[in-house]
Image (cartoon, rainbow, N blue to C red):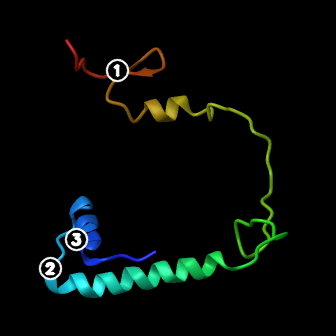
Amino acid sequence: MSVDKDTVRKVARLSRIKLPEERVEPMTEELNSILGWIEQLAEVDVEGIEPMTSAVELSMPMREDVVTDGNIQDKILANAPRSEDGFFVVPKVVE
């Protein structure tokens, strides 16, 4: 796959990137080299290789998933200008 100058201009316009005319040719070369590298990666034989999320094998400690309220409602409501029945009181914003 190859990118030409018209395609670079179109992509720049669609992505709303101001690309001066003197940068079109270098950008075309850069994009073509990137696409060539991607084509080179497609040639690599990855048969039998398991996908991985990291180069280093990690195991995360697991904890029990328990929902709690933190038992600090009074401390949190102490920061509010007004509270009522355990809730924040805020001004009405929609009429």
- Residue picked out by circle 3: 9
Q: Is residue 41 left or right of residue 47?
A: left
Q: Position of residue 42 (x, y in %)?
A: 63, 75
> Which residue is found at the position 31% from the left and 77% from the top?
4
Q: Position of residue 25 (x, y in %)?
A: 25, 86
- Residue picked out by circle 1: 89
Label 3 sits on a secondary structure element that is: helix
Q: Is residue 12 left or right of residue 56?
A: left
Question: Mark 3 or 2 closer to N-term?
Answer: 3
47 in relation to 30, above or below: above
- The residue mark sitting in front, 3 or 2, is 3
> Which residue is found at the position 29% from the left and 70% from the top?
7
Position of the C terminus, as image quadrant, is top left
64 in relation to 52, above or below: above
* Circles 2, 1 touching at the beta carbon (< 8 Å): no
Q: Nearer the viewer, residue 87 or 43?
A: 43
- Residue picked out by circle 2: 20
